[in-house]
Amino acid sequence: MLPRTGLRAIALLLTTSAVALEAQSARPATPFTVVETSIPQLQAALAAKRVTSRQLVEQYLIRIATYDRTLHATITVNPRALQEADALDRERAQGKLRGPLHGIPVALKDNIHTTDMRTTGGALAFADLVPPYDATLTKNLRDAGAIIIAKAQLTELANWVASGMPGNYNAVNGQGLNPWDPRPDPREGLNDGRAVLGTGGSSSGTGTNVSFWAGNVGTETSGSILSPSHANMLVGIKPTVGRISRYGVIPITADQDTPGPMTRTVADAAIMLGAMEGAAPDPNDAATKVCTPPANRDYTPFLKADALKGARIGIPRAFFYDTITSGGSSTPRGGLSAAQRSVMAEVIAVLTAQGATLVDPVVIPSISAKNADDNLLDWNPCSGLEQARGRDASCSMVLKYGMKRDFNIWLATLGSKAPVTSLTALRQWNIAHQRAGSITQRTVS
């Protein structure tokens, strides 16, 4: 098994070498810190020789070793991160820059393939899986110069394998916690180790929040980039399906899955998005044929201070701001609290002041429809044993149908390295390994 997060693994990576001693002697008088440092700031410091990529990796590893025993933001640390940094430092010294992330450490949600680190999806059955191929986005990031420093925490298999499982928990790494309140929930009935404050979805972004790396890649099917970005005060981009290749990403459903960046700033997100995107369609992901990248795969020219001038922005009041009783429910649902409404009013004022044209209100038919058959709110994704086969007439089957189809397709790409051969076999494996902590309640049936 490859080295896991922990003091022993970090200490091994930080073992002093001739290269490390040379780097230490060249450090500037004013220390450079990675804490809350943006990617452009890292780029500038590297270009000005204020810091080396090795020194960046050292700082990030020290932060992981110091704080991750509490947060559980990482599942695996790259055992070759320092060697990769040294190689990229040598390339920089020779005048060679691979791309906008040259020598900058980032993390991948641990459902994204890497051939030099395990890819677990948080599932015990895959705890030792080292895939036979890199994800396309992994290759693209490395081609752009990125150092994949770690594989990040997630809810087991992106939270589509069990009912009642706490968010950001998996059987491999336990419960991930939110740095804004990193406590287990103390309340009776909830005091089983789950977080008192949620991390928001299955790709937490916690490590980006506390500067374990410069940014991370999440994956979203229905909220797993947007929700954790909100919960961790990050910028998240959920790209159009096909904008970023899904090849080498453990799936829920190809109809909705999409990887995207989660970073501290908008500029950082733009830089990572371009680095993740391929210059040409990926032959292993047909959806990439319909998305044309911008010139040089560079989204930073769109970072304009006056970009909101003339932009039309809709404000959907029903459900999102105001409670409604439409569709198949007679109980008011949705809406914001008074404190939330106050904050959103401030946001709308800022948008208006920046020149945006507000369309207020915007009516979304699938939210306001009186007929339950036409109202999206009455068609939540089928989940849990109570909505298993034969009990799913009133919920959306899109996700569980897609996973039964696409998970098996993904397993087949692993060839002889696949620990199980089908979703059914995974369920049977979990039942057989309950004493080890495997998750056995399934949502797909």
Image (spheres, rainbow, N blue to C red):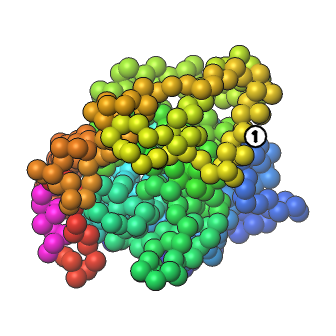
Residue ID at (23%, 44%): 394
Query: Looking at the rendering, which quadrant does residue 370 occupy?
Result: top left
Q: Secondary structure at mark 1?
A: helix
Q: Position of residue 342 (x, y in %)?
A: 72, 46
Is residue 84 shown to the viewer in this render?
no
Q: Main secondary structure of the magenta part?
A: helix
Whether the magenta-drawn stretch holds residue 304 is answered as no
Residue ID at (18%, 43%): 393
Amino acid type at circle 1 is Glu
Q: Tag 1: Cα neighbours inside 10 Å, few (<14), some, or many (≥20)?
A: few
221 vs 225, left or right, is: left
Q: Is residue 125 above or below residue 328?
A: below
Q: Position of residue 59 (x, y in %)?
A: 67, 65
Q: Position of residue 407 (x, y in %)?
A: 22, 48
How many marks on residues?
Answer: 1
- 116 vs 278, nearest the viewer: 278
Which residue is most to the right? Answer: 29
Whether the magenta-drawn stretch holds residue 425 is answered as yes
186 vs 247, left or right, is: right
**Magenta segment boundaries in residue numbering:** 423-432
Q: Is residue 413 above or below residue 150?
A: above
Query: Looking at the rendering, which quadrant does residue 423 occupy?
Result: bottom left
Image quadrant occupied by the N terminus = bottom left
Q: Which residue is mark 1?
A: 346
Q: Position of residue 298 (x, y in %)?
A: 60, 27
Q: Is residue 344 above or below residue 78?
A: above
Residue ID at (38%, 45%): 330
Which residue is most to the top? Answer: 310
Is residue 441 shown to the viewer in this render?
yes
Residue ID at (71%, 16%): 310
- 283 vs 304, nearest the viewer: 304
426 vs 322, left or right, is: left
